[in-house]
Amino acid sequence: MFTTRPIVAKLDEEINAQLEQLDQNRSDPAKYDAIVERIAKLQKMKSEEKLPLPNLDTALIVGANLFGIIWLTAVERETPITSKAIGFIMRTR
């Protein structure tokens, strides 16, 4: 259900690789600082990722449910429904 986008997954892999190099280069201050700067840039790139748009299927389901609710309430105003009309609405999973 919650899948990681390819860009975020690649950024995570690169951050992990840089963290491993960070442990190996503790004795060299120049390399250590360069790796820390790279990690900071990668984290900044990861935080600037925008939220993905919802799936077309999800939007259609939501739209159909809203239409059904509006239609049922309009019909119920005219003639009361004696059955359980709410059971027709699709449930979320």
Image (tube, rainbow, N blue to C red):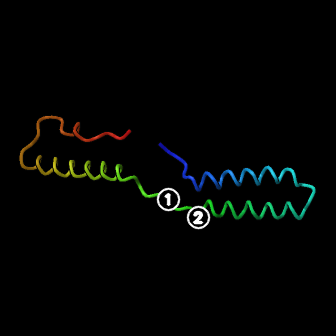
At 47% from the left edge and 57% from the top edge, which residue is drawn? 52
Check the picture and name the quadrant holding the C terminus.
top left
At 57% from the left edge and 53% from the top edge, which residue is drawn? 6
Q: Where is 83 relative to 5, above or below?
A: above
- Label 2, secondary structure: give it: loop
Q: Which residue is identified by label 2?
A: 48
Q: Please, which residue is most extreme toward the left here?
A: 79
Asked whether the residues under the numbered discs 2 and 1 touch, taking CB atoms below 8 Å apart as contact, a structural biologist would say no
Identity, as a three-letter code, of the amino acid under mark 2: Glu
Q: Where is 84 relative to 52, above or below?
A: above
At 58% from the left edge and 56% from the top edge, which residue is drawn? 7
Crowd rating for badge 2 (residues with CA inside 10 Å; few <14, some 14–19, many 20+): few
Identity, as a three-letter code, of the amino acid under mark 1: Leu
Q: Please, which residue is most extreme toward the top here?
A: 83
Q: CA distance from mark 2 to mark 1?
A: 9 Å
User: How far from the left and from the top, in percent, is residue 59?
Assistant: 33, 53
User: How far from the left and from the top, in percent, is residue 82?
Assistant: 11, 36
User: How far from the left and from the top, in percent, is residue 48?
Assistant: 58, 64
Q: Nearer the viewer, residue 14 or 41?
A: 14
Left or right of 30? Residue 1 is left
Left or right of 61? Residue 67 is left
Left or right of 12? Residue 89 is left
Crowd rating for badge 1 (residues with CA inside 10 Å; few <14, some 14–19, many 20+): few
Q: How many discs appear?
A: 2
Residue 66: mark in rendering: none
At 79% from the left edge and 49% from the top edge, which residue is drawn? 20
Q: Nearer the viewer, residue 83 or 26?
A: 26
Q: Where is 84 relative to 20, above or below?
A: above
- Label 1, secondary structure: give it: loop
Residue 51: mark in rendering: 1
User: How far from the left and from the top, in percent, is residue 13?
Assistant: 68, 50
Left or right of 80? Residue 92 is right
